[in-house]
Amino acid sequence: MTTFTTSGSDKKGCTTTMSIKRLRTVAALSAVAALALSACGGSGNGGGGDTGGTGAKNEFNASLTQVVNPSDKKGGTIKMAHSDDWDTLDPGETYYGYAWNFARLYGRSLLMFKPAPGKESNELVPDLAESLGVPTDGGKTWTYKIRKGVKFEDGTEVKAADVKHAVLRSTDKETFANGPAYFEAFLNLPAGYKGPYKSKGVNTDSAISTPDDYTIVFHLKNAFGGFDYLAQLTQTMPVPAAKDTGAKYRNTIVSSGPYKFANLKAGKSFELVRNDQWDQASDPNRKALPDKYEVALKVNADDIDNRVISGDIDIDVSGTGVQPASLSKVLTDPALKAQADNATLARLWYTSINPTVPPFNNIECRKAVQYGMNKVSYQTAYGGPFSGGDLATTIMPPLVPGYEKFDLYPAGPDSKGDQAKAKEALTACGQPNGFTTNMAYRSDRPREKATAEAFQQALKPIGINLTLKGYPSGDYFSQYAGNPPFVVANKIGLATNGWGADWNDGFGFLSQIVDSRVIRNTGGSSNTSVRIPEVDKMLDAALAETDTAKREKMWSPIDKRVMEEAVIYPGVYAKSLLLRPKNLSNVFISEAFNMYDYLSLGVK
Amino acid sequence: MTTPLEVEPGRGEDPEAVLQGMPKIEGRSLGQIAWMRLKRDKVAIAGFVVIVLLILMAVLAPLIVKAIGHPPNDFNQDLIDTQGGTLAPLGKFGGMSWEHPFGVEPVNGRDIMSRVIYGSRISLLIAFFATLLSVAIGTTMGIVSGFFGGWVDAFISRLMDVFLAFPLLVFAIALAGVIPDDAFGLQGDSLRIVLLIFIIGFFNWPYIGRIVRGQTISLREREFVDAARSLGARRPYILFTELLPNLIAPILVYATLLIPTNILFEAALSFLGVGVRAPTATWGGMLSDAVTFYTMPHFMLWPGLAIFITVLAFNLFGDGLRDALDPRSR
């Protein structure tokens, strides 16, 4: 999620096209690296299975680990609002965490993340499939059995061919340019295959075969132990070929979930109403409590906050947290604060220290930055402990399985920088009086600007003078901070950066930012500073490991090895402040999405 | 009850005696008359005083800020509510205190007063030089166009039309984005300042050019020009010695009114993020930073007030100057 806006509004201004280009090249370089997509998504999650229990008190952070207002009462309308347009409702292309969270209301993917609060939500459970995938051929072939009796809104039964069509159409990146690109990277598709619209009648059984109506088999180019994560993508939500209208399907979606579309006004609003063809008996995850969902689009972001506070709107559907304007209002009013949750995200805001730019080619000079920077001012630049996040000392955030806490460069007792150590490192580097270098940031992101200013302030006392250079975020990685020749020519010693994975997984989190093979001279990569051959080998070894527990233990050493080279300055583990809906039941935060689980909500 | 009328002091005196104490009436030049009129215009004088104070503030900014003791880019994060998480300044009214009379910025706690003072340097510098550039180009083009007429006039007038039709703001944003960090032997803030002076100054000349052209056309047929011509004066002499002094008044007035426009334009460009780069303080940039914190109005108040006062002062002075130099236009 390099492309997440960090701006005050924290709107997800994500340019996923970039990530797809990146992914494609990565896949071409080494099929291995393909898992690590940078998108704006959270991950797919499952519906309300066992969310019962006594429930939690309405207090600050109550729904992080527990269900608030548990209830089985049906009926009512849930009102949602979005400050922007939906990226797209088409399950084949949508690529935002909130959209994946929401899509489960109108579509059923093969698997989903368990709809449960806290850690449990990272567990994959079957949805349209009867069980998790069965790997054969050492992880190169994955078989799923589809539930019988699941119906589309028009009454026809969902068959394996509908899932196959859905996956194949999503690989057509000319039609669905912004969608995730995992399937075309992993599936053994015929050479030159361009999706079912353009490559009509091409036999695709080498990639996906359907031996009978209720069995679907995926054939991969290389073994991939984590394929179940792909099976939970919205791209596996069935699409009937007869009713597929290509790029226009986003306005004519055929539902397979408990709700179907009504009154869809593109770019303005839409509603979900009950789909009478959906059968509770076929669905162990969803409760489908409310009768209706109303979603308003392009509503002013500050207005949304105020209306959520007043109870006029239930949820800000984008799930990125309150606007800066509401922040102080929420935090200073005890009643409002009790109505808020401070969700942790699997995202790191960091700064690259480029060893290609002298004097940072000397590790001691890089260490001087690690010691000298005031970590608290980094956190403050990002919005402080609540809307910014926690002080980071590692690359992997605590939410990612395999995370281990360590701190190679303690920044003094108050985390405000250790000037003595920094001076020592500078002397060891042969620059006892400091030096001058440049720092890049995305000029349209106030938080990155504040970060760059914080670096400038913190490093001045030890003699490192920074000149700040703002670049537009749209081309930040392709033209500027992610373009190695530009970095060298313009002496970009430091560059603000950020990363989050599509789902909580060590490989997805690390590989795009620490694998040196993703760096391309033409630019476009989030990794601008990490070139350690040993780390590349460690990543390959970890991916080849099929045992999940063993694999998860292999991430932290990689993290540590990168930190030893001091080429990344970890700033904050991101957090967001969410307003809990007042009038809804079954409210809890899913760690898979880092926002409220939209599947289980009901009206009080 | 009747009381005798008290004679007011001075009333009963001899009219001649009153005149005796007065200075002798002398002939006065146009400049003196204008100055007298201007002096009588209290509002314009107030504007002038404010302008002088502003210029002094800009010139002496380093000394003033040294006296205050808070450099404009220094963080004071101990004055910020980082624990509560609101990042607002601690204390009432945006952290206003004797130490920080205007309060401090949210997030990083920079002293707003020093930043406003330093911001005046950028605003005034750019506005003055951009105006100077516009006036120089505009006057030359206008006087040449008006005096020579014919195809020269046609060409320059069409050129003015082209410049006036230019989408200036869009062009400014594009140009400021395209220019690299090092260009024309300059870099950093000095490059941005020169660039802004060029953009703002270069595209504003047709306004003043048109005024000068119109005035020149009306002047060139006047008797004193004819007289000079018949005495064999060369064109440059007529242009710069006969015509130009008579154009000073409108040029001066227009320049004074152009400065505030340019201050606003510079603020707009800084607001849009294409002005001078962070962390250098500019009024427009401060306003832009303040937008995300609109619940803390003090942050927006001070730079906004600074722009408001500056622009008002220039406008009032400019108006007064016009009234003084050219009372007919009242």
Image: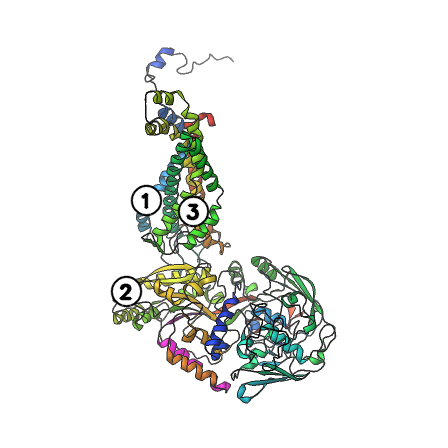
Q: Which of the chains bears the disc numbered 3?
A: B
Which is more toward the observer, A27 or B19? A27
Tell me which residue sits at (47%, 77%) in the image. Answer: A33
**Res A440 → quadrant:** bottom left
Q: Give residue B60's position: percent from left, percent from top.
A: 31, 45
Residue hosting label 1: B59
Q: Gap between marks 3 and 1, in whole Å?
A: 19 Å
Q: Earlier in the sequence, mark 3 or mark 1?
A: 1
Which is more toward the observer, B3 or B45? B45
Disc 1 secondary structure class: helix
Disc 3 secondary structure class: helix
Q: Which of the chains bears the disc numbered 2?
A: A
Residue hosting label 2: A434
Tell me which residue sits at (35%, 65%) in the image. Answer: A488
Same chain check for tags 2 and 1: no
Report the amino acid beneath label 2: Gly
- Numbered range of the magenta stretch: A546-573
Same chain check for tags 3 and 1: yes
Mark whose residue sits in front, 2 or 1? 2
Residue hosting label 3: B266
Tell me: residue A207, above or below residue B160.
Answer: below
